[in-house]
Every structure is written in C-alpha cells, then in structure tokens.
Amino acid sequence: MQPEEVVRASADTLAAAYRSGRVSPIDVTRAALERIRQDNPALRAYCLVDEDGALAQAEASHRRWRHGAALGPLDGVPASIKDLFLTAGWPTRRGSPRVDPDQPWTVDSPVAARLREAGAVLLGKTTTPEFGWKAVTDNPIDGVTRNPIDPGLTAGGSSGGSGAALAAGMGTLSVATDAAGSTRIPAAFCGVVGLKPTYGRIPLYPVSDLDRLGCAGPMARAVGDVAALLDVLAAPDDRDPNAMPPPTGSYRAGMRRPVRGLRAAYSATLGYAQVEPEVAKVVEAAVTALGEAGVEIRAVDPPFSDPLDVFTVLWSTGMTPLLHSQLGGSPHGIDRGLAELIEAGSRYSVADYLAARRAALDIGTAMGAFHREYDVLLTPTVPIEPFAAGHDVPPGGAARGWPEWTPFTLPFSLSQQPALSVPAGLTSRGLPVGLQIVGARHAEDLVLAVGAAVEEALGSTAGATGDCA
C-alpha cells in the first residue's frame, strides 16, 4: 500500500492488510506520524503527539499479528483521543493554561483503557477549546484549529481537533466528546463521520458535570469504523454510575441490517431553524438518495419547539462547577467567553435548573412517542457552511453566541438520543455538508445502518475531497 492509501484506509482494510502481511502496523503508524509532521503545524489538530510511544505500540501490534494473536479488528489501527479524556502518561490540559501539566498523570479514562485493550495505536491527543465549552476549536495554548479542506475555515468544535485530524489523514480513528454537537459539528464541517451515542452508552470517568448531556463520541472517516470503535468503547466500566449495561450484540454487525422499508421523518428546519440554501440543497439530495434505496421518507417536523433557552440553562449551570473543581475559585486567565458562561450559570436558581431539566425530559418523552411512528429522523447536521477560523460565530451574521448557529444538534443532546452525522455531499464551493440521522434511545445499530446506507447511496462524492497534503 502506498502512503496515501495507508493514511486513508479504513480500519477493516488495515486489519486485512495486517493479517495478510501486506503492510504492518509499523508502516501505517509511520505514515500517520509523517502526515502529522507535515500538516499539524498548520492545522493544529493535535496538541500532543507521542511518536516514540506510538511506534512502540505499533511494534507490539506487529508481533501480535505475525503470531496470530491480534487483540481484535482495531489492533494496530492509529487512533487519537481528545484532550478532555484522562490518558495515563500524558497530561490532560483540557486546552487551558490553568491546568498544570507537571503533575502525575496515572489514570486512564474508560475510553483510553478500552483503546489500549483493543491494541489501537495511540498517536496523541487532539485539540479542544478550553474545557470543551464551545462549538469551534481554539485555545490559548495551541492556537486555532483549522479545517483541512480550507485552512482559512473553522473545523468546528469542540472536537475540531479530532475532525481535522481525520480529514487530513492524521489517524484512522478518534474519540471525541459530544454534549451539544461537539462530535457532529466537526464531522459535518470536515466531511467525516461522528456519532453522539445514547447517554450512558460509553462509560465516562470522571463523570461529566454537564448533567446528562456529556457523551464520548466515536469519529472516523467511514460509518463502519465508527461502529467498530463503538463496539470497543461501549464495554462496561464500573467507575461510571450512569453507564448502561454492555450491548448484547455487535454494532459492526448490526449496521449491516437492511434499511428497505424503514420509515424516516425528514425535517428540513425542525420547524424553526434557518438553513443556508446550499446546505439545504445538498441535504435534500442525500435524503432523496436514501429514499431511492428503499427508505420511506415523509416530511414532518418533530414535536418540540426551539429548546435554546432550555439548553442555555443546563449548559451554563453545568460549566459553573469548573470554577472550583478546575480553576481554584478564580476565572482569571481563561477564555473570556467561558468566564462569562460560568458567571451566567451562577445566576440561575435551583428552580431554574429543575425547570430546564423537566423541559429536557419532556423533549425526550415526546421523541419517544415520535419514534413509535418513525424509525429515524433526518435533518441537516449544521445549517451553515464552515465559516472563518478564529471566530465563535460566523462573521457578519446575526448569531450572538455559538449555540444559535447549531440548532439541529442541541435538541438530541437534551433528549439523550443517538445522533449520527454522515457526509451528505459538497456545496458549490467544495465544502462538506452533514446529514444528521437521529434514532430512538438505545438504537445506535439502526442509526448506523441508515448511515451506512447513505454512505453506499452517495459513494465517494459525499465526503471531503481535499486536504493540506
């Protein structure tokens, strides 16, 4: 395999090549590290790269494959972890200069532990805004993360480092987070695949302060790789009291289920969002292609109104504990927007919080009833094209804060449902557009199956077409 093939290959392709001896995990890891050396200075997708550690892991994987003792289909596959997850041996700075890197880092989060157990090669940590607080990616330590499709544009956030790394070929898999769209937004902007699973599907430690919003989000360039990664990450970990029981089957196998005859609701606006015409056109074409593949499509909006105010209460009150748990009681020196968010959260009362929590539960209840009639809901992932890097909101637009420009991702974090962003196609400027596929709680296998059907129906035309190479 040539280097460009290697850095773009799926996990399945790599496993087959390892098994046959056609290529080794050492070759693949070296190719990924070379791509990082080449592109990361401009893109700022990684905040930490461990070349020596990655090569040592690759050599161990090579020995396992050579002796027929591979740990599974992800053994030797290059992966990255967002810098919000504890990873033993590496600092977890969370994008903040207020976090001291010179301290013992001896604990693996559940996602880091599961990746090690699967034999994945951990390349490094991907960039996040401070504490993952917003839907673009920049921080005072690492600067601005840029989109490989056009480095003048944002990669989205808060998992923009993961999205940019995957789009540029700097690894095959990445583990991100999603509490408001942080996996799905960069997946849409960078032309890759990202899943927000059902809340509790992937164990977390430490458990997020973002009450019943925060999830780990598997990301890759293909739906099959996201499913394979979810198979690994959904294993139990008793440090998370909110974690669900382990799945009863394989998501990788479940995504192969036929989709013909499934019933899908298509909501172009959720009844309240404004969508750029180019984005709407691309999403409409993807939905049409899915209908031609045998899914029954009906245009219908889900049964809730704009939950922006509800989200604002839960997001700000969830961020406020950072003031004491991470910042020693003082917001000095952090991102100004994060400081304002923490201050706003402190002004809400317990009654305000409980009312917002009730409203979120009501959305979940309404969507439970909705999915009795419709297997999935289809929407745009983000209603706009990627905008200029270094800005929290599109310059010159009407949005005052980032939640205002991502109306399609917020509701399904509140309702705790699985939601997948898959590439839907490209605008006339060659910029990626995402299609969001939402399922009932616990229906990751169905969401992934529909995502795979979209991928098959659209072929290679849906995703990103270029990078910095």
Image (spheres, rainbow, N blue to C red):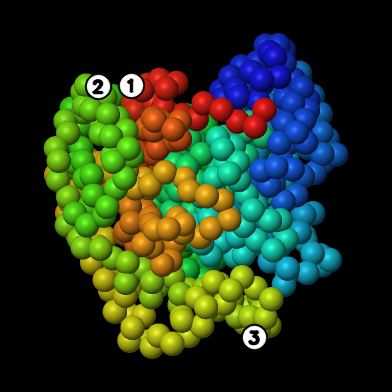
The answer to whether 232 is drawn above or below residue 257 in the figure is below
Residue found 85% across the figure and 39% down from its top: 52
Marks 2/1: CA–CA distance:
7 Å
Disc nearer the start of the sequence (2/3)? 2
Q: Secondary structure at mark 1?
A: helix
Mark 3 — residue?
329
User: Looking at numbered disc 3 in the image, what kind of residue is underneath it?
Assistant: Gly
Residue at the front extreme, as displayed: 396
User: Looking at numbered disc 1 in the image, what kind of residue is underneath it?
Assistant: Ala
The circle drawn on residue 83 is: none
Residue found 73% across the figure and 68% down from its top: 97
Q: Position of residue 465 (x, y in %)?
A: 51, 26
> Disc 2 vs disc 1: Cβ atoms closer than 8 Å?
yes
Which quarter of the image is occupied by the N terminus?
top right
> Disc 3 vs disc 1: Cβ atoms closer than 8 Å?
no
Mark 1 — residue?
457
Mark 2 — residue?
293
Q: For mark 1, does the 10 Å Cα neighbourhood hold few (<14), some (14 to 19), or many (20 or more) residues?
A: some
Residue 426 appearing in the image: yes
Q: Is residue 29 left or right of residue 168?
A: right
Q: Nearer the viewer, residue 150 or 350?
A: 150
Which quarter of the image is occupied by the C terminus?
top right
The answer to whether 313 is drawn above or below residue 372 in the figure is below
Rendered image quadrant of residue 138: bottom right
